[in-house]
Amino acid sequence: MSELRYVNLTHDLAEQCAALEHRVFPHTEPEGLFTVEGVHAYADIFPEGFFVCLDADRVVGQAAGIFLDFDFDDTQHTIAEITGEHQCANHNAAGDWYYGTDIVVDPAYRRRGIGKELYELRKDVVRRFNKKGIVAGGYMPGFAAHKDEMAAAAYIDRVVAGEIYDATLSFQLANGFEVRGVLEGYVEDDHTDGWHALIVWDNPDHEESA
């Protein structure tokens, strides 16, 4: 197998990054996914928060995010509302949290540790900039098979309890994230009806400013 490498986003990767997301999330409305223009905007605004896994010159995984402030007293939001145009317009360098907007791995490259490494790179940037942690809307692909028999909150509770395995949410929990809520209509997705879990990773090395 070839050696994988990880880089920050550059403009020349925009088309591949957008194509990868659309390939991995076929049930999500295209308006809720990256466009080539949007990835170019990310490259201008905050490439340090956008990590790309390459196999030679091929994009096989990516994880994006921006800094912003997050109100834990009013957690309900859609990804469009909280991130702004192109999922990066609301980036605020002084924000307390890294908000994860996107993480995907090419299906042909799964089980090679790419997802775990992308999460570690996110945690590294949080530590480097002394942010409080990571917030994201956690996709729950397994919910599609259960949505007719239980509510999203009940499904999440059973995943957290280890009674149901969800390919994405269970992986996130294994990587140190906690569920802090349920997000309704996070994106338009006919597979999960738009339901996501609000997931949070607290930075144990965060130091409050004097």
Image: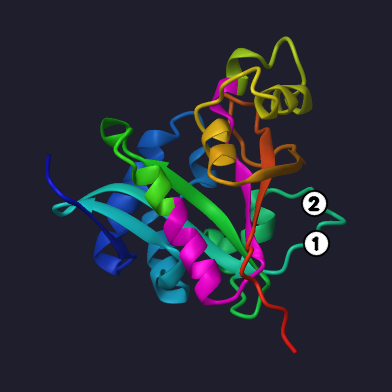
Q: Are marks 1 and 2 in contact (CB under 8 Å)?
A: yes
Q: Amino acid at mark 1?
A: Asp
Q: Is residue 107 left or right of residue 186?
A: left
Q: Nearer the viewer, residue 69 or 166?
A: 166
Tell me residue 147's x, y (percent). 68, 17
Which quarter of the figure is the N terminus placed in?
top left
The 10 Å Cα crowd at callout 2, few under 14, some 14 to 19, many 20 or more, is few
The 10 Å Cα crowd at callout 1, few under 14, some 14 to 19, many 20 or more, is few
Q: Amino acid at mark 2?
A: Thr
Q: Which numbered dot is residue 75? A: 2
Residue sticking out furthest to the bottom: 210
Q: Which numbered dot is residue 71? A: 1
Q: Is residue 208 left or right of residue 192?
A: right
Q: Quadrant of residue 26?
A: top left
Tell me residue 67's x, y (percent). 60, 69
The residue positioned 53% from the left and 37% from the top of the image is: 29
Please tell me whether mark 2 sits on a helix, a strand or a loop: loop
In the displayed structure, 207 sits above or below 66; it is below
Range covered by the magenta-colored residues: 119-142
Please tell me whether mark 1 sits on a helix, a strand or a loop: loop
Q: CA distance from mark 1 to mark 2?
A: 6 Å
The residue positioned 12% from the left and 45% from the top of the image is: 2
Is residue 90 among what the camera can see? no
Magenta-colored stretch includes residue 126: yes
Tell me residue 16's x, y (percent). 28, 51
Which quarter of the figure is the C terminus placed in?
bottom right
Q: Is residue 189 left or right of residue 152?
A: left
Magenta-colored stretch includes residue 188: no
Is residue 32 among what the camera can see? yes
In the displayed structure, 63 sits above or below 196; it is below
